[in-house]
Amino acid sequence: MISIIFAILIIIGIVYGMISGNVEVINNEIFNSSKKALNMILEIMPVLVIWMGLMQIADDSKLLDKISKLISKPLRLLFPTIPKGHKSLGLIASNIAVNMLGLGSAATPLGLKAMKSLQELNKKKDVASDAMITFLVINTSGVTLIPTTVISLRLLHKSNNPYIIIPSAFLATTIATIGGLLYDYFKRRRNK
């Protein structure tokens, strides 16, 4: 659906540009924006590749299991239906840690693995479990300590102070996470 909306907006922009006599501007912008997009990808990709590689090493070396045991008590409060020591807790913990560092793209594979693991525990396969919903709330609102990707983009675009967003990003994501978890908790209690 979003791709259809974007396609419609692009077509409207091109038609408007043709009607207003700005065809040359449209052509220049198409070529320049594709060049900018490629440069942006090339600037950010090394950070993501390194982080995803480190996460794979952490998974292979059973470090995720150790992280899971370390923060299992706080996670057990949020996910009481997950059995103690289950691999889902390690994947959830890793996803939260990577999101806290502002690397949402690198957290996506961990989040997908966590959801798959939670689906294995789910008794009703066609309905999301409480643990899946809670994880989705945490993953979507995700507390961000250092918004690495946004800082990289700001550096790429020559921002005077790319790090100024750290306090506001932390505050906004903390409020979003707390609000989301409270809503999830009260909605679940009301439904039961």
Image (cartoon, rainbow, N blue to C red):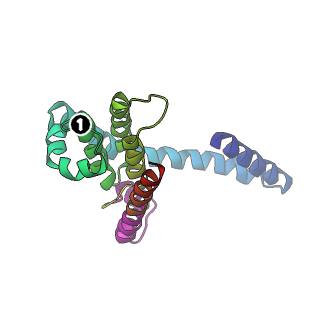
Q: How many numbered badges does the structure rendering display?
A: 1
> What's the magenta region?
147-176
Which structural element holds mark 1?
Answer: loop
State the residue at coordinates (30%, 51%): 78
Q: Is residue 169 magenta?
A: yes
State the residue at coordinates (58%, 49%): 33
Residue annotated with mark 1: 83
Determine whether, in the image, residue 185 is placed left or right of residue 28: left
Determine whether, in the image, residue 88 is placed left or right of residue 31: left
Counting from the top left corner in percent of width and height, residue 145 is at 30, 61
Front residue of 154/9: it is 9
Front residue of 129/151: it is 129
Task: Name above or below for residue 35 compared with residue 158.
Answer: above
Determine whether, in the image, residue 14 is placed left or right of residue 100: right
**Magenta span: chief secondary structure:** helix
Counting from the top left corner in percent of width and height, residue 88 is at 28, 37
| Residue 13 in view in this figure | yes
Q: Is residue 30 magenta?
A: no
The extreme front residue here reads 192
Front residue of 169/91: it is 91
